[in-house]
Amino acid sequence: MCLLRRVSGEIPVNAHIGRQTAIASLHEAKLADCIKVMADWGYGVTSEEVKDIAQQFVVKNGLEVPFKEGRPGYDWLMNFRKRHPEIVPGKTEQLSVCRARAEDPEVVEHFYPLLQTCHNVLI
């Protein structure tokens, strides 16, 4: 019966069995992308920080979720990690020397006038 309903289009082909996730897939993907960017910048997030980020995301976007006080629990975190295996708990890493120099205020101040010059040349 279920296969017939999928073939007829009554149920989407990619529909999952069971309850929906607490945070919609689209929002969860944005959350995962944010955490990946933080990891790329050398800031690995711990399990508690992932839950903090999720809580802030839920509150800021006014999402209705079944979390107590808007904070996800351990079960949500484990299922989130199953859905996004590329996200692993990490620790903050030291920046490479090159990246650390690029954050020097003098380098940053010099960068923006150069960027403006390039922008003016291209326009």
Image: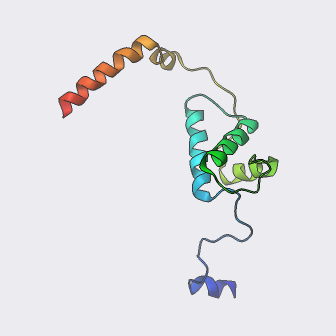
Residue at 63%, 59% (x, y): give it.
24
* Residue 106 or residue 80, whichever sits in front: 106
* Residue 113 or residue 89, whichever sits in front: 113
Let me know if residue 86 appears in the view: no
Task: Classify the position of the C terminus by image quarter.
Answer: top left
Residue 58 falls left or right of residue 70:
left
Residue 37 falls left or right of residue 117:
right
Taking 89 as reference, is 112 above or below it?
above
Let me know if residue 123 appears in the view: yes
Residue 31, image x and y in percent? Answer: 60, 46
Residue 79, image x and y in percent? Answer: 74, 53
Residue 90, image x and y in percent? Answer: 69, 33
Taking 13 as reference, is 38 above or below it?
above
Residue at 58%, 34% (x, y): give it.
38
* Residue 20 or residue 98, whichever sits in front: 20
Residue 2, image x and y in percent? Answer: 68, 84
Task: Classify the position of the N terminus by image quarter.
Answer: bottom right
Residue 77 falls left or right of residue 26:
right
Taking 41 as reference, is 110 above or below it?
above
Residue at 40%, 14% (x, y): give it.
107
Which residue lies most toward the top here?
106
Task: Answer with the quarter of the image where residue 86 lies.
Answer: top right
Residue at 57%, 20% (x, y): give it.
95
Q: How is the image coloured?
A: rainbow
Number of numbered discs overlaid on the protein picture: 0
Task: Answer with the quarter of the image where residue 64 lies.
Answer: bottom right
Taking 36 as reference, is 82 above or below it?
below
